[in-house]
Amino acid sequence: MELLESVNYWHWLALGLALLACELLGTAGYLLWLGLSAMVVGALLTVIPMSWQLQLVSFGVFSLVTTWLWWRRQLKSDTADDAQRQLNQKHKQLVGQTFVLDEDFPAGKGRVKFGDTTWTAQSDSAIEAGTLVEITQLSGIVLTICKKN
């Protein structure tokens, strides 16, 4: 108990700096907010005298609040980035692509060769071989194609 009662602002500042130094080793932000929270507690302790219980509670509250705020910001950023991302999202990569039909395509469903794969495709009208077509939609593994104007 005497050890806890002797904790002063230098201890909190040292703990904060140690956590920030450990963050530099590559903990991906886990120790950043704990280190900053310890520094805030140390700064508050220089101005406001607090018991060791209040110091620990304020450290816990600051840690939770800063971590939660960062998580909310990061989640919003990740969601926006995912909407722009095209890697491993076939529907975003294929829609708008054009190619020339090798064979006549009947109205309704049929098979087309696009790239190195044959796909199930659908079209509202029959399309002749040698026509430039565009992929307008991808539903599961079925391409929707139409004549390119």
Image: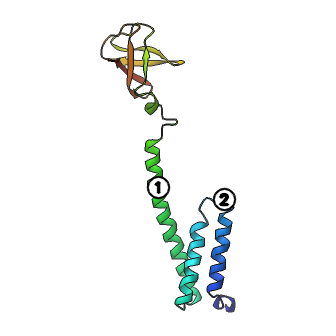
Q: Which residue is mark 1?
A: 75
The quadrant of the image that shows the N terminus is bottom right
Seen from this angle, which residue lies furthest left? 124
Give the mark toward the camera: 2 or 1.
Answer: 2
Q: Amino acid at mark 2?
A: Gly
The quadrant of the image that shows the C terminus is top left
Q: Front-most of 48 and 125?
A: 48
Pointers 2 and 1 in contact (C-beta within 8 Å): no
Q: Front-most of 79 and 2?
A: 79
Dot 1 falls on a residue whose secondary structure is helix
Q: x, y percentage for residue 126?
A: 32, 10
Q: Which residue is mark 2?
A: 26
| Residue at the spot 52% in from the left edge and 80% down from the top edge | 58
Figure check: 37 above or below 93:
below
148 to the left or right of 51: left
Q: Residues within 10 Å of mark 2 (few under 14, many from 20)?
A: few
71 to the left or right of 148: right
Q: x, y percentage for residue 145?
A: 37, 20
Q: x, y percentage for residue 131?
A: 38, 11
Q: Amino acid at mark 1?
A: Leu
Figure check: 82 above or below 35:
above
Dot 2 falls on a residue whose secondary structure is loop
73 to the left or right of 9: left
